[in-house]
Image: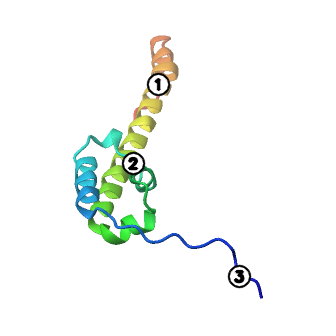
Amino acid sequence: MEYSKNTRSSPRTLDLNHIENTLRIILSQAEETLPTITEIAKQLKINRIVLSRHFSELCHQIVTKRRNYMRMSHLAAIEQCCQEIKEAMVLPLRFSGISLPER
């Protein structure tokens, strides 16, 4: 049996204070600028799983805040589309004298 010639790199020490401060700064940002946990991990040059294990509560708060923003943004986009359809289709019909049922 042959063993791999690649040696495992030695584990590096994490600057937990720096990582925690970075996560808190990210959490205080506006919702539309929140990166994903994967993007944060890449920025910090650590594994996403390691980040989630050491700072599960902060990661959860970031994910929740981002998810809420994405949901609200999605609903606002749907509302905007509905408004555009109403303006493009319904209002011209009313002005032309065609009566439409009210909802």
In screen coordinates, is 28 left or right of 3? left
- Quadrant of the image containing the C terminus: top left
Q: Quadrant of the rendered structure where residue 54 is?
A: bottom left
Secondary structure, mark 1, is helix
Mark 1, Cα crowd under 10 Å, few <14 / some 14-19 / many 20+, is few
Q: Residue at x 29, y 58 (%)?
A: 19
Residue type of the residue flagged with mark 1? Glu
Local crowd size for mark 2, using a 10 Å CA cut-off: few (<14), some (14–19), many (≥20): few
Relative to residue 51, is residue 101 depicted above or below?
above
Mark 3, residue position: 3
Considering depth in this image, is 103 or 2 the residue closer to the camera?
A: 2
Picture layout, residue 92 above or below residue 42: above
Q: CA distance from mark 3 to mark 1?
A: 64 Å
Q: Nearer the viewer, mark 2 or mark 3?
A: 3
Residue at the far top in the pictured view? 96
N-term mark: 2 or 1? 2
Callout 2: SS? helix
Specify how the rendered protein is coloured: rainbow
Circle number at residue 84:
1
Disc 3 marks a residue whose amino acid type is: Tyr
**Residue 4 percent location from the top left of the image:** 69, 76
Q: Residue at x 40, y 32 (%)?
A: 102
**In-front residue for pair 49/36:** 49
